[in-house]
Amino acid sequence: MRRSATAAALAGLWLRRPGSRLGGVLAVAVLFASAFLGPAAAGGRHDYEDALRKSLLYFEAQRSGRLPHGQRVAWRDHSGLTDGLEQGVDLVGGYYDAGDHVKFGLPMAFTVTMLSWSLIEYGADVAATGELAHALEAIKWGTDYFIKAHTKPDELWAEVGDGDTDHYCWQRPEDMTTSRQAYKVDRDRPGSDVAGETAAAMAAASMVFREHNPHYAHLLLHHAQQLFEFADKYRGKYDSSIAEVKSYYASVSGYHDELLWAALWLHRATGRAGYLDYVVNNADGFGGTGWAITEFSWDVKYAGVQILATRLLLRGEHSARHRETLEQYRVKAEHYVCACLGKNAAVGADANVERSPGGMLYVRQWNNMQYVTSAAFLLSAYSDYLAGAGAGSSGAVTCAGGEAAGAGEVFALAKAQVDYVLGSNPRGMSYLVGYGARYPARVHHRAASIVPYKHSKEFIGCAQGFDDWFVRKGANPNVVIGAIVGGPDRCDGFRDHRENYMQTEACTYNTAPMVGMFAMLNRLARHEASQQPENRSSPATDQSVNSY
């Protein structure tokens, strides 16, 4: 489970505005590749379809509950079958967030939001690989759990398990002896951040299932609307209501970003103007047009909010009364994009994201890959929105200091980050486990590091796992295929040691944004190989959820 260390995060949020926009045209992404990856890292082709297939396997490795007959990760078995029993509620299912066995609602919901957004933007590309069913299963495994966890209109179970006792043990999930206490937010103990993110996840997922399972989509949207009303009416931070989460997934950014985020997803799912009014009316008070951000994560959603709001501006999907505020959102969205590009020249070095010598975006030491993969997705989506901007809209980004970047340059950075993850880096190592010739072998993951339960049902006790398995120097007996680990440091250094959890632990929200990216890059690679001209913004882009 990856804490954000986000006290430092908010120190990097800037309030200055980039300058006015300049015109631009779509550039060819390959022309910029060498600028974003060092000489030792550039070059080489990747099998994006293989990466996609493997990324979806990872979510099966993280499943909690009773596993289905079609479970493909054979070294996992049923676990957490009594979750919620003490509280009289069925909380069986959902996902373990990382290499341990607590079910944390906030990062789980963010994972599902990003999986759903991947399909909304690039669903046709996922379908073209034959992986759509697996992608839908990954989303539904999460949303089925959220339906269970949302037991009343104003009640949401936000955590199962306790991080302190869980970390005291090193066991397979099938052997768990740690606390499975469940914790909720409600009217008396509010949690606007976790309720808001869960509303966003269910609203986004409702769009994905609209064509394939209309009844289920309607159910998800009903829950999303109720959760948003609950989050907005009874405001408060969930880590003030659930003390046990504070050391693991504290909501440092507060809940205002989640409320804006949820409203934007509900607007996209329903088309109801009231949700956009909410985003516009609360733009200043909630920081949507105030915070200029250099990261996007399970905790800090502002960059995603700003990019979704800018999409409405670029597509002309707004009323005249909304335009001025949406323009302000665009200023902040472009600050994030320019920060990643390293082009915020007029507001100081801290307004840009650091880059490793090999070209990796670097935000902080602990699980930096979460910021790399989320940035890659946001940059790709934003470049799509720029390229598809309607008449009268600038198709370029203007950064603080006046430097401009076209959609192609923005996309080139997104692709470079994906390629870095897959092995185009100074170490020549893939940080997507199971992909390529070299990848982490000692992932900090309890289930992967211990002999499979199906092969040896002999009970492994709490401390026994540390004594017999954690300390082993060899590779894990199970490969947690598709996991994206925490990754290298600011100098591209990486130690493949099980105890090095900052670098070798993987999280569901690291991999989730890459599902759509791998699928889209696979399409582009295939067209390039066949030497057929291809506009990256295919007809499927942004309508793919309705054209599977």
Image (cartoon, helix red, strand yellow):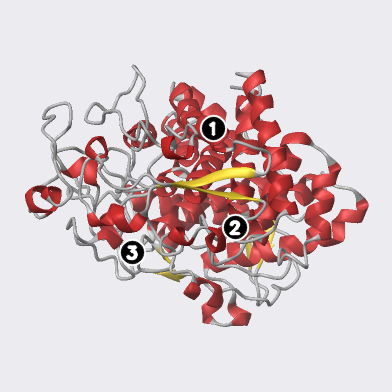
- Label 3, label 1: how many angstroms apart (C-alpha)? 44 Å
Q: Position of residue 50 (x, y in %)?
A: 33, 32
Query: Mark 2 or 3, which is nearer the eye?
Result: 2
Q: Residue at label 3?
A: 358
Depth order, front residue of 206/328: 206
Regarding residue 22, the answer to whether it shows in the image is: no
Callout 3 environment at 10 Å: few (<14), some (14 to 19), or many (20+)? many
Q: Residue at label 2?
A: 301
Amino acid type, callout 2:
Lys
**Residue 202 relative to residue 501: left or right:** right
Q: Which residue occupies 7% across, 48% down?
A: 468
Q: Position of residue 169 (x, y in %)?
A: 22, 52
Q: Which mark, residue 148? A: 1
Circle 1 SS class: helix
Q: Which residue occupies 52% across, 70% down?
A: 342
Query: Mark 1 or 2, which is nearer the eye?
Result: 1
Q: Position of residue 118 (x, y in %)?
A: 54, 38
Callout 2 environment at 10 Å: few (<14), some (14 to 19), or many (20+)? many
